[in-house]
Image: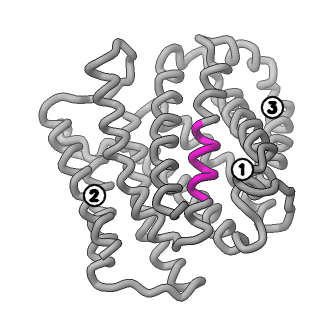
Amino acid sequence: MTWYIWAFLSMIASSLENIIDKVIIIKKPGNVDILCAMFFRNLGFFVCIVLIGLTGLIGKMSFVFNIPILILVIVYPAVSFSYDHFLRNYEVSRFSSILHILPLFFLFFDNLFFHYSYSLIQLIGIFLLVFGSLLFSYNIKKNKSAFSWKGILLLFAFLVVEIYLYIIFKITSETINGVSFFASVWSMMMIEYVLLLIITKKYKKLQVTATSNGFLLNTFIAKSFDSLSSVFYMQALSVATLTAVSAFISLSPLVMLVILLCIYFLTNIKISEDFSQETLTLKIFATIILILGSLFMFM
């Protein structure tokens, strides 16, 4: 199976995960404690990763612990907190699309650590990916970015930690597969979350959060897609460059937009997406730019 197929499967699974998480959180956000929600999301991800590892379909699961992974475990709650903030305050299409500025950062790291070089056409493709991502985050009605300053800062923290995660995996991908990497990181992370719940005494709110509109069950369903998306992504990353994989994944706004439109027009599920004519036109235009950027990357 080529890395393109792994990346495409990752796109579909990731889109479904984001949408399910969004639907869960907008039902009764007040009943869902942030730290408890972070704990359950990471627990769901860890359980699903272990189950995938036990099947042996992606390779043998093993556990590896070292200083870079320990650092990742310490800082990763910043990603979980940022993700929860995005779910509560922004349209899922916007915050998922803005993450596609990653190829700009990966371009630097690919050159620095792995000595890959890119043509002028490919560099133009990266520029289009970044421009399309920023355009997607633009609120045309208010004539400004859809993200507040707090959202921008959290986005920066999210990107920094995610970049660190992918670089650590890419460096170690010759000796550890995606399942083993995630199992190692999240086994330590669950210990961290248990300690955080005890220290903050938020463990008292676990039951209320878990039973709020089927939060626990729906979260585990979402994390099953998240775990598949992450493993598929790492499978692609193990045989292709950081920039190439992230550029191909930039097609995911198209997948996301199609799924959201189907939900919006064909169901009664509340997804809190703005599909007014001017906003939808902007989102479609931004998606086209992202697709062009992705295509340029492979010329």
Q: How many marks?
A: 3
Q: Give the mark nearer the N terminus: 2 vs 1.
A: 1
Q: Is 263 above or below relative to 280? A: above
* Residue matched to label 3: 197
Viewer-side residue, 110 vs 147: 110
Could you give the CA–CA distance between mark 3 and mark 1, rounded to whole angstroms?
34 Å
What type is the residue that disc 3 sits on?
Leu
Q: Nearer the viewer, residue 237 or 164?
A: 237
Residues tagged 2 and 3 counted as in contact (Cβ below 8 A): no
Residue 57, disc: 1
Label 2 amino acid?
Ile
| Side (left or right) of 40 relative to 127 | right
How many C-alpha atoms fall within 10 Å of the one at disc 1: few (<14), some, or many (≥20)? few
Secondary-structure class at tag 3: helix
Is any part of residue 245 visible from this angle? yes
Residue 14 in the image, given as x and y percentages of width and height: 50, 43
Segment colored magenta: 225-234
Residue in view at x 35 percent, y 33 percent? 259
For the residue labelled by badge 2, is the local secondary structure a helix, a strand or a loop? Answer: helix
Q: Earlier in the sequence, mark 3 or mark 1?
A: 1
Q: Position of residue 180 (x, y in %)?
A: 78, 56
Q: Is residue 155 above or below residue 212?
A: below
Instruction: Nearest to the eye among marks 3 and 1: give it.
Output: 1
- In the rendered structure, find residue 291 and report the number of the disc placed on it: 2
Residue at 15% over, 40% down: 281
The reply, left or right, for residue 165 in relation to residue 55 is left
Magenta stretch, main secondary structure class: helix
Contact (Cβ within 8 Å) of mark 2 with mark 1: no
